[in-house]
Image (spheres, grey):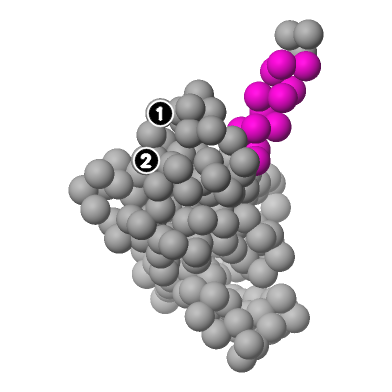
Amino acid sequence: MARKTKEEAEKTRQALLASAFKVFSTKGYAKTTLQDIAEDSGVTRGAVYWHFKNKIDLFEKLLDHAFLPVRNILFSKFEETSSPQEILVTLMKIWLHHVTSDQNFRTAFEIIFNKTEWSEELMPCKLKYKDEELRFIKKVELIFENGIKEGAFRKDLKPAVASSFYYSSLFGLAQYSLFFKNELDINKEIDSFINMFLHSCICEN
């Protein structure tokens, strides 16, 4: 019985997250209420509070649900023994795959880009992800440093500049895929983006 209750609770939690994705992306963060999400998922408002402290907690858990699995995959690649260029190419492939094919990932980006006013109450959540992004940037910077030392990347590259450009390219493509999704199928052009990146930094022998 306890196992069934636990499974049912998790099923309700997943349903609430699915409704949160739907309602936040439709109404935006500010105009969404927990009652809206409860009604969309077919549960009581009390059931929402059983799983989440408040709307901020639900919003943060929604972002974690969408972003943390991808974040964990990306950060794991920094521990591999592949060459610097192979690591950066792999990171780009993983990122662009999720940007174009992972619906929760895409919806979460649409919510934070287009449907959220970052008020003071949301700053802790925003700063948490800002810190994670800075960690990513610094790890990419180290990859460029190692690549330059090994002769894989051009010696005139500045690692900090290269990593900021790399990061900006990834997030820019995520935005592009949302704003101009009918203009270009990014998923079909992943190799083109990778070739442009490599051409900009690879050392020519």
Residue beneath label 1, please? Answer: 53
Residue 56 is tagged as: 2
Residue drawn at x 37%, y 40% as measured from the top left = 56
Position above or below: 42 against 4 = below
Position above or below: 12 against 175 = above
Relative image position of residue 17 (x, y in whole percent): 58, 43
Whether tag 1 and tag 2 are in contact, CB under 8 A, the answer is yes
Q: Is residue 5 magenta?
A: yes
Residue 138 visible from this viewpoint: no
Closer to the camera in the image, 25 or 44? 44
Residue 21 is tagged as: none
Crowd around label 1: few <14 · some 14–19 · many ≥20 (10 Å): few
Relative image position of residue 61 (x, y in whole percent): 49, 39
Position above or below: 136 against 97 = above
Relative image position of residue 43 (x, y in whole percent): 59, 35
* Residue interval drawn in magenta: 4-15
List the single residue furthest toward the top.
1
Q: Amino acid at mark 1?
A: Lys
Residue 1 visible from this viewpoint: yes
Prevailing SS of the magenta stretch: helix
Residue drawn at x 61%, y 91% as measured from the top left = 183
Is 27 displayed left or right of 106 in the figure? left
Residue drawn at x 78%, y 8% as measured from the top left = 1
